[in-house]
């Protein structure tokens, strides 16, 4: 291997690492606030990429219908919950409509906008708008009533949600993969490296999002409320912070990050309905590097995973996944030696 | 009583008659799969339902068993029966490695590691020429047993179900035994089990290895049933489905594993037929329904189907009481007791800092054999922290603790329990779904020795009788023998506290540490408890007691240590303490 190959592999690794970093951040975010190990994170990646592909073809992706259906289901559930709690019908109906309104409005808008052959950037925005509300809805449907269950139960729920969403992905998008056009076709030469516009966008978008998350958690009251929920749910609730709202918000952010990652990665590789799982899991490995708790640690871990992947695909391409996923074991060893007495129940 | 024995016998008879009856081949095959799946799910019952740990990698252990026998029997002509043990050996090694890496940390690292391990193994097999890549290994020999070929599905059926039922028998025996009680204590946290002398890490490893071994056996059967192996049945998806089976059937119950595997296998087959027809295209659509069902199950029937059925039939088949078969059992070994007046516990300037906060500030006191010492102080004075320092639940920042002349500071609570110190907890820690008797018997853990294998083979009954005899004796001592068959979770708070004392007594302690034993007791119960403690003292036992009820403390103790803001205020007889202006000031405030 000479320097030019190494630098190409480095670039490749950093680019993928940037995507994994986003997913790792989302994983840490969701785990910290809700204690949910969010395996279905990757499904939003596939949903984002393939919804965009559908829009590219001028079709109405079935994710739009899915969004509307979920919105309607949540409205019904909220209505039923309100009725059981003895609320007056108009009040319960208003509350139900309020929680489902964004999904329904975006769904209807998308029904109109999808066949319009919008410009690329608007299609990307529409995709984000379609996938992002799904996060909160998934939280409402699957997790909210189990919010106080153990980490283990929540993890098993995650697996159930992952199953369901992957199966639905197959229904929505079929078994064929898609690859989207680049957002920016320019390319730059820097020595032996050829930097494509898409690579730049991926790296810049990741950095921007990481900064935004940092600002959100450090500087905004809402972010601090989320952190408070992460530290102590009951305490936060006593301070008037709704742990339900915090859960929904963190899931919505996770869905946004997932969809964005899908948009970013789909011009560089073909995405299938089930590709998200592996991509998400690599973000996951990165999050485990950071013990599911530190944001900078997760970002760093993600870049390491990306580099490990690109170099192992050069040396032993058939075993690239084996190497990436086995790398979690020494990491766990290191963590257990460093921090042997963490106990949680 | 009759139907209780009749029904299982009838079920067993039907199960073993099925292959000779004109049952279609299809159902025999289904039942073979169900038996093999149930073996894996059984491991998850032990691991997840009872022990509170989860693995998504069981399918990968199935794969280890299957590939080992495939490789050895086709390439090297080794007997499948030898290959079974080779597969088990590989499985144990891998399971030990994974356990060593993850089980010291929080519970959720194990499932994550198993996900990674399942993915890695699958990609490894699928890309290794030697293992046949995606095509796998073909042409496995059929099993032979004493010259009898088990090539036919109906013949193999017997082997599958003998293994499955033997597995169920072993796990059921294990759960009702000394190591079983230790395993059942894992789910509620490790503090109590450690204080009873149980190495919780060791039992976590044990149940993970047992679960992996059951999966490996299932893989061996699977390989010789299919006569070919390829990576896909051992993928992560299948690992998740195994967990699903355990959850659907009832993750805490042995028979739930069988119900779950049966329901899932049949449901999945039906859905695979039905859904593509409904949706008009091909694909793994059944996973949508399975996923949604899993979430709904956890929400509405988190205990699973088997406990649900049990609840329905409870009217006709009430839960059976443990047969009282321990009359005249030999007493458990007792430790040599300290002489009255001997220096028992010496606490020398113990200190605990949490960051900048000094919770316990250089506190010293002594206990002599046969004394009852009270530790009192306003809320937040550091009493419970001192308690935790002495019993090894928390680690010392500085200072020394000597117990019976030997330093115990810095030892963990398990080692301290071994030396004859036993404790109760401010918030009762017990195993709610075990009977009072079984909970108390956990206290006898260190005085008995039956291991996991003995328990699974039910060779531990003589020792079990001794344990239950001891447990009953201790329950009698505190006047609870009438409630010994009740589930601990059904007791009121007061009796739960008394049960904890009985459990601590069951360890045959030289020093008993009681954390607020009288809280939640009614007046009469308090008097009775004080009487019990006086009697224990008369028998030479020493007691350190944290308590808020002043009447209780003053009437019972020989000396009292008063703490405030982490420091020792004074120490003296109850009269001296009551007369002390400092104590009054600490409790009631001073005039300025």
Image (cartoon, coloured by chain):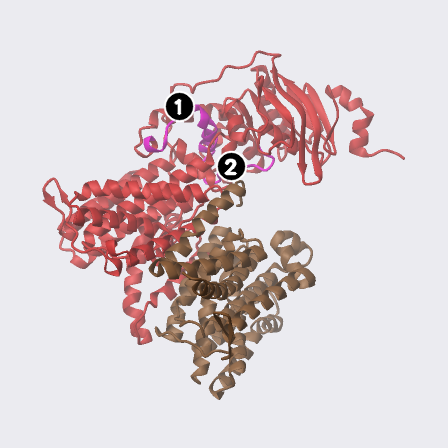
At x 43% / y 35%, what residue is drawn?
B202
Extreme right residue here? B592
Q: How many marks?
A: 2
Q: Which residue is mark 2?
A: B430
Q: Which residues are magenta?
A: B425-454
Q: Colour of chain A?
A: brown
Q: Secondary structure at mark 1?
A: helix
At x 34% / y 36%, what residue is drawn?
B173
Q: Which residue is mark 1?
A: B466
Task: Kindly indicate the quadrant of the structure image that contains residue B585.
Answer: top right
User: Which label number is shown at residue B327?
Assistant: none
Q: Nearer the viewer, residue B560 or B527?
A: B560
Mark 1 vs mark 2, CA separation in Å: 21 Å
Question: Residue B105: x, y in percent?
Answer: 50, 44
Question: Residue A328: x, y in percent?
Answer: 44, 51
| Relative side of B267 to A35, left or right | left
Q: Colour of chain B?
A: red
Q: Mark 1: few, some, or many residues within 10 Å (few <14, many ≥20)?
A: many
């Amino acid at each position: 291997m000479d320097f030019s190959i190494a630098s190409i592999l480095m670039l490749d690794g950093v680019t993928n690492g940037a995507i994994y970093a986003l997913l790792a951040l989302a994983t840490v975010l969701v785990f910290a606030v809700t204690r949910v190990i969010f395996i279905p994170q990757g499904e939003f990646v596939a949903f984002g990429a393939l919804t965009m592909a559908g829009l590219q073809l001028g079709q109405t992706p079935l994710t739009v219908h899915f969004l509307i259906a979920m919105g309607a289901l949540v409205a019904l559930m909220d209505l039923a919950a309100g009725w059981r709690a003895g609320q007056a019908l108009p009040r319960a109906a208003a509350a139900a409509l309020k929680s489902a309104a964004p999904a329904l409005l975006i769904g209807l808008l998308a029904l109109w906008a999808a066949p319009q052959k919008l410009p690329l950037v608007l299609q990307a925005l529409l995709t984000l708008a379609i996938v992002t509300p799904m996060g909160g809805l998934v939280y409402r449907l699957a997790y909210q009533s189990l919010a106080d269950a153990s980490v283990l139960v929540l993890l098993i729920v995650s697996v159930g949600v992952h199953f369901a969403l992957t199966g639905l992905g197959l229904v929505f998008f079929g078994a064929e993969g898609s690859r989207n056009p680049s957002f920016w076709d320019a390319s730059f030469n820097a020595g032996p490296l050829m930097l494509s516009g898409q690579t730049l966008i991926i790296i810049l978008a990741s950095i921007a999002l990481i900064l935004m998350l940092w600002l959100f958690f450090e500087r905004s009251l809402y972010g601090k409320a989320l952190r408070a929920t992460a530290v102590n749910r009951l305490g936060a609730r006593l301070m008037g912070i709704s742990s339900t709202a915090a859960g929904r918000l963190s899931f919505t952010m996770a869905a946004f990050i997932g969809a964005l990652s899908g948009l970013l990665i789909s011009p560089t590789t073909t995405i299938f309905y089930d590709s998200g799982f592996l991509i998400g899991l690599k973000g996951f490995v990165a999050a485990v590097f950071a013990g599911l708790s530190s944001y900078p640690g997760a970002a760093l871990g993600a870049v390491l995973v990306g580099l490990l992947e690109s170099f192992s695909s050069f040396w032993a391409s058939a075993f690239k996944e084996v190497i990436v996923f086995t790398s979690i074991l020494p990491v766990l060893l290191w963590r257990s030696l460093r921090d042997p007495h963490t106990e949680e129940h | 009583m009759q139907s209780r024995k009749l029904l299982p016998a009838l079920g067993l008879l039907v199960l073993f008659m099925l292959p000779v009856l004109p049952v279609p081949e299809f159902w025999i095959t289904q039942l073979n799969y169900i038996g093999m799946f149930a073996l894996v799910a059984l491991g998850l019952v032990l691991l997840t339902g009872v022990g509170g740990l989860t693995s998504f990698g069981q399918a990968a252990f199935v794969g280890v068993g299957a590939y080992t026998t495939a490789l050895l029997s086709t390439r090297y002509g080794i007997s499948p029966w030898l290959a079974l043990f080779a597969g088990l050996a590989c499985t144990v090694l891998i399971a030990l490695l994974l356990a060593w890496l993850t089980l010291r940390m929080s519970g959720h690292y194990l499932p994550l590691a198993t996900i990674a391990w399942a993915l890695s193994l699958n990609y490894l097999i699928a890309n290794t020429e030697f293992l046949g890549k995606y095509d796998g290994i073909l042409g496995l020999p059929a099993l032979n047993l004493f010259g009898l070929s088990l090539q036919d599905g109906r013949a193999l059926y017997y082997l599958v179900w003998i293994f499955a039922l033997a597995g169920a028998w072993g796990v059921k025996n294990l759960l009702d035994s000394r190591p079983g009680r230790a395993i059942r204590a894992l789910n509620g946290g490790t503090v109590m089990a450690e204080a009873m002398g149980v190495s919780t890490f060791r039992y976590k490893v044990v149940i993970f290895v047992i679960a992996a071994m059951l999966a490996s056996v299932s893989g061996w059967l699977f390989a010789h049933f299919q006569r070919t192996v390829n990576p896909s049945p051992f993928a992560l998806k299948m690992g998740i489905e195994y967990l699903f089976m355990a959850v659907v059937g009832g993750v805490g119950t042995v028979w739930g594993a069988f119900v779950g595997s049966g329901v899932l296998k049949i449901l999945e087959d039906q859905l695979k037929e039905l859904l593509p027809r409904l949706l008009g295209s091909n694909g793994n659509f059944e996973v949508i329904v399975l996923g949604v069902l899993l979430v709904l199950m956890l929400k509405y029937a988190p205990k699973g189907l088997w406990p649900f059925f049990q609840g329905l039939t409870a009217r006709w088949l009430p839960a059976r009481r443990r047969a009282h078969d321990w009359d005249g059992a030999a007493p458990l070994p007792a430790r040599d007791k300290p002489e009255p007046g001997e220096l028992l516990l010496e606490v020398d300037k113990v200190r605990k800092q949490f960051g900048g906060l000094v919770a316990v500030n250089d506190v010293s006191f002594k206990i002599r054999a046969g004394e009852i010492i009270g530790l009192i102080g306003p809320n937040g004075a550091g009493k419970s922290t001192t308690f935790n320092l002495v019993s090894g639940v928390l680690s010392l920042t500085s200072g020394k603790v000597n117990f019976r002349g030997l330093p115990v500071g810095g030892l963990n609570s398990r080692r301290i329990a071994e030396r004859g110190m036993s404790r109760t907890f401010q918030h009762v820690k017990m195993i709610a779904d075990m009977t009072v008797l079984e909970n108390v018997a956990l206290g006898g853990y260190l005085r008995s020795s039956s291991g996991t294998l003995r328990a699974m083979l039910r060779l531990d009954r003589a020792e079990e009788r001794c344990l239950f005899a001891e447990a009953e004796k201790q329950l009698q001592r505190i006047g609870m023998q009438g409630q010994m068959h009740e589930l601990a979770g059904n007791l009121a708070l007061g009796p739960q506290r008394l049960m904890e004392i009985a459990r601590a007594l069951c360890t045959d302690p030289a020093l008993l540490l009681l954390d607020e034993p009288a809280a939640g007791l009614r007046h009469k119960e308090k008097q009775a408890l004080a009487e019990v403690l006086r009697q224990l003292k008369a028998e030479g036992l020493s007691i350190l007691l944290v308590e808020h009820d002043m009447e209780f403390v003053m009437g019972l103790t020989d000396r009292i240590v008063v703490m405030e803001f982490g420091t020792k205020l004074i120490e003296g007889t109850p009269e001296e303490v009551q007369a002390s202006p400092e104590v009054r000031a600490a409790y009631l405030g001073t005039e300025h």
